[in-house]
Image (tube, grey):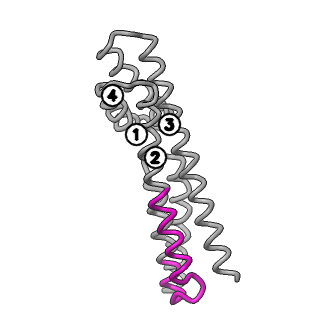
Amino acid sequence: MEILFVLLSIVLIVLGVAGTLFPALPGLPLMMGGFLLLAWTDQFRHLGSTALLIMAVLTVVGLAIDFVAGLLGARITGASKQALWGAFIGSITGLFLGLPGVILGPLLGAAIGELLARRDAWQAGRVGLGTLAGFLIGTVAKLGCAFAMLATALFAWFW
C-alpha cells in the first residue's frame, strides 16, 4: 500500500509540474498535495514541517503572482473594464482549445474587449500584448516556484 501512495505522490507532482505550463491544471496545488502525501507516507521523516511550510508559501506566492501578473499586464497598458472581462472570458474559452487557445485566448479576449470599449485598434493591440506579457510573466513565476518546491523537497529528503 505504501508503494501505491508513493506512486500517487509522484503522479501528482509530475502533473503539477505540467500544470505550471498548462493552465487547465492547478499545478502548484497538485505539487503541494503530492509532496504532502509523500511526507505522510514517509511519516514526515524526510519532508518535515519546515520543508512543507516553505513549499506551502511557494504555492501561495506562485498562485498570487500568476493571478496578479495577467491583470497588471493589462492594467499597465491602460486596459478598460471590458478588456479585463474579455481577457477573463478568453482565458476560460481558451482552456477548451488546447495550448494555443490558452495562450491566445486572453490576448484576443482583451483586445476584443478593448476594441469594443474604445474602438481604437492600436490601443486594443497594446492591451492584448500587455495581457500576453502578464500571462508569460505569471507562467515563469509559477515555473520558478515549482522548481523551488522540487529543490526544497530534494534538499530536505537528502539532508
Q: Is residue 125 above or below residue 103?
A: above
Mark 1 or mark 4, earlier in chain: 4
Q: Earlier in the sequence, mark 3 or mark 2?
A: 2
Q: CA distance from mark 4 to mark 3?
A: 15 Å
Graded by Cα atoms within 10 Å as few (under 14), some (14 to 19) or many (20 or more), the crowding at tag 3 reads many
Residue 95's disc number: 1
Q: Which mark is residue 86?
A: 4
Q: Amino acid at mark 4?
A: Gly
Task: Say if the magenta span includes residue 30.
Answer: no
Assess whether mark 3 and mark 4 are in contact (beta carbons under 8 angstroms). no
Question: Does label 2 or label 4 sit earlier along the sequence?
Answer: 2
Lower position in the chain sequence, tag 1 or tag 2: 2
- Check disc 3 and give the amino acid type: Gly
- Secondary structure type for disc 1: helix
Q: Are marks 1 and 2 in contact (CB under 8 Å)?
A: yes
Please name which of the two marks, 1 or 2, marks the residue nearer to the observer: 2
What is the spatial separation of the Cα atoms under label 3 and label 1, in whole angstroms? 17 Å
Instruction: Point out residue 120 in the picture as x, y percentages from the top left corner.
Output: 38, 10
Mark 4 and mark 1 in contact (Cβ < 8 Å)? Answer: no
Instruction: Label 3: state its secondary structure.
Output: helix
Quarter of the figure with residue 92: top left
The picture quadrant where one finds residue 6 is bottom right
User: Badge 2 is on which residue?
Assistant: 23
Kind of residue sitting beneath label 2? Pro
Residue 113 - label: none
User: Circle 3 sits on which residue?
Assistant: 134
Q: Position of residue 93 (x, y in %)?
A: 35, 34
